[in-house]
């Protein structure tokens, strides 16, 4: 039976993906890529809408679904990362806006030996014996540190490397990332700038549940009770922004208040930081555009969220 017109074409092969993109571009279409790890929710689907809006003309939207092992440390939740490929395809088809789904079986070569001398410290420890055989990595050296990079030292090199591979395979004109993963978005912007990728990067706003919880594939692992407690994240961020806009520019006070709220709710704080929006450099006073970034554990689930603040000039 022929596929319905809006049903995305599923492409698994790298060469087929590249050829598909080149055909679309030859037809005069803008190729827009939305990279995801699947188990899609409305936050992901908002990126598809943002891609269509950014193209402002004939567009071929490609959504990639690939759970990238290279960004997970061995202690992290790769094995339990949720997936529902059939459900994802249904959701993407329902948008009527996705032309292709790229789901490569594997995007990096396993089996080489990690070079222990290369990294020293945390990264080489994490690599030992875990088959991280890929030899070529993209490091966005300053931006990958701090925030999530402190507790996830291999995360951003895994993200940057696999996103670069997706860029080389799909050859998009536009790629859309969620501000939910604020540091990731900035790392990709920087990589694109530094390596001269001819790709426009769009940062798209965070989509939240009605009660404020930032949508995340990992929310499915929260119990009802944990989910209720996790609302303290968005609540504390909104309160912090209100305080900042009402003249409390004292960063440490604002951070302390957020930590207190999260801990009182039963969360275990990984970090609460206030940083400049582009450089992600910590700020002591919120007297310029800043973003408050939070990572906290509720039960076995690590959640991240953030809120941008543009203080009145
Ligand atoms: P993931 O599948 O979690 O790796 O996310 C794929 C893309 O969707 C990334 O660019 C995320 O930042 C983005 N994303 C995830 N959750 C949200 C959300 N709640 N709102 C907007 N974008 C999101």
Image (cartoon, grey):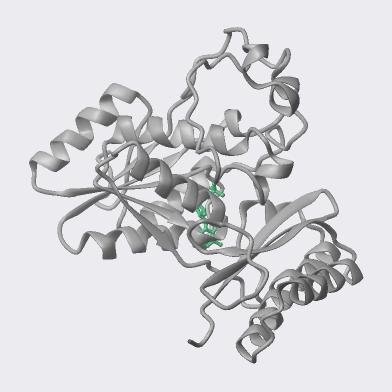
As drawn, 146 above or below 269: above
Residue at the location (88% across, 66% down)? 263
Front-most of residues 138 and 224: 138
- Of all residues, the one furthest to the left in this rendering is 27
Q: Position of residue 289 (x, y in %)?
A: 51, 73
State the quadrant of the N terminus. top left
Q: Quadrant of residue 242?
A: bottom right
Q: Quadrant of residue 133?
A: top right
Q: Quadrant of residue 202?
A: bottom left
Front-most of residues 242 and 100: 242
Residue at the location (88% across, 70% down)? 265
Q: Position of residue 198 (x, y in %)?
A: 24, 42
Q: Is residue 35 visible?
A: no
Q: Is residue 244 shown left or right of residue 20? A: right
Residue at the location (65% across, 90% down)? 247
Q: Is residue 72 visible?
A: yes
Residue at the location (62% across, 37% down)? 155
As drawn, 4 above or below 194: below
- Of all residues, the one furthest to the bottom in this rendering is 246
Q: Position of residue 190 (x, y in %)?
A: 42, 46
Front-most of residues 223 and 267: 267
Q: Is residue 54 shown left or right of residue 308? A: left
Q: Position of residue 184 (x, y in %)?
A: 53, 49
Q: Is residue 240 shown left or right of residue 232? A: left
């Amino acid at each position: 039976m022929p596929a319905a017109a809006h049903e995305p074409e599923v492409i698994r092969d790298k060469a087929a993906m590249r050829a598909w993109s080149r055909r679309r571009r030859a037809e005069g279409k803008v190729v827009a890529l939305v990279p995801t790890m699947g188990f899609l929710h409305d936050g992901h689907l908002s990126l598809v809408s943002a891609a269509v809006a950014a193209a402002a003309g004939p567009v071929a939207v490609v959504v990639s679904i690939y759970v990238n092992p290279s960004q997970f440390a061995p202690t992290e939740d790769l094995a339990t990362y949720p997936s529902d490929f059939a459900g994802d395809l249904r959701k993407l088809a329902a948008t009527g806006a996705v032309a292709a789904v790229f789901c490569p079986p594997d995007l990096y070569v396993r089996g080489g030996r990690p070079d222990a001398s290369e990294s020293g410290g945390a990264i080489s420890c994490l690599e030992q014996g875990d088959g991280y055989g890929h030899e070529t990595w993209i490091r966005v050296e300053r931006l990958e540190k701090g925030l999530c990079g402190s507790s996830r030292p291999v995360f951003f090199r895994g993200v940057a490397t696999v996103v670069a591979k997706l860029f080389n395979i799909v050859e998009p004109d536009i790629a859309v990332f969620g501000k939910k993963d604020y540091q990731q978005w900035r790392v990709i912007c920087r990589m694109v700038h530094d390596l001269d990728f001819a790709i426009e990067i769009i940062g798209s706003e965070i989509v939240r549940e009605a009660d404020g919880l930032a949508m995340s594939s990992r929310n499915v692992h929260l119990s009802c009770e944990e989910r209720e407690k996790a609302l303290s994240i968005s609540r504390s961020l909104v309160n912090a922004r209100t305080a900042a806009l009402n003249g409390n520019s004292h960063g440490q006070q604002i951070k302390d208040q957020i930590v207190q709220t999260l801990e009182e709710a039963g969360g275990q704080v990984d970090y609460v930081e206030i940083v400049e929006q582009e450089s992600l450099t910590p700020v002591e006073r919120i007297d310029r555009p800043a973003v408050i970034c939070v990572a906290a554990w509720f039960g076995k689930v690590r959640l991240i969220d953030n809120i941008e603040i543009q203080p009145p000039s």
